[in-house]
Image (spheres, rainbow, N blue to C red):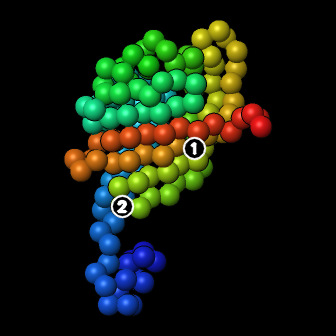
Amino acid sequence: MSPASNLATAVGLKPPDERPARTGVAQVLRYYELVDQGDVPGLVGLFEPDAVYCRPGYEPMVGHDGLTEFYRDQRVIREGRHIITDVVAASSQVAVRGEFNGVLHDGRAVSLRFSDFFEIGDGGAFRRRDTYFFAPLV
């Protein structure tokens, strides 16, 4: 039993249903596998048809068409690998922190830290994703 379940039981409340969080974590980890494999149809299929993805430097990507266009035509990364270092999940929210190492389309190597926040819809697909990069801007 999780700490939240133990606390809820101790104070006489119904423990939270942790299944959505566990399912969401598995879905998020699968997402990174598909991105690293370059499987655009597979990764887009993890999102709701009208999902929104917000990423620094881009207009929000909306729906399967917007996501497909981004991953096929706009993403500056040619290839690489995500290493997830931390995952936090509660209810329909999953947050990750990790590292990415790869190669840009212009041949330059890239290595950076990132955080992603996923909102899982009722059917288990991603409703929203927000990405943040650790970069010296301020």
Q: Relative to residue 67, is residue 106 drawn left or right?
A: right
Residue at 45% x, 12% y: name it. 73
Question: In the rendered view, does 105 fall on the left or right side of 45?
Answer: right
Left of 122 or right of it: where is 107? right
> The N terminus is located in which quarter?
bottom left
Q: Is residue 120 visible in this depiction of the protein?
A: yes
Residue identified by numbered label 2: 91
Point 48% across, 24% down: residue: 59
- The single residue placed furthest to the left in the displayed view is 123
Q: Is 29 rendered above or below residue 39? A: below
**Residue most toward the top?**
106
Name the foreground residue: 35 vs 16.
16
Q: From the top left corner, tell me how far across and down residue 16 is, in percent.
A: 32, 72
Q: Position of residue 113 (x, y in %)?
A: 66, 39
Q: Quote the CA–CA distance across marks 2 and 1.
A: 18 Å
- Amino acid identity at mark 1: Ser
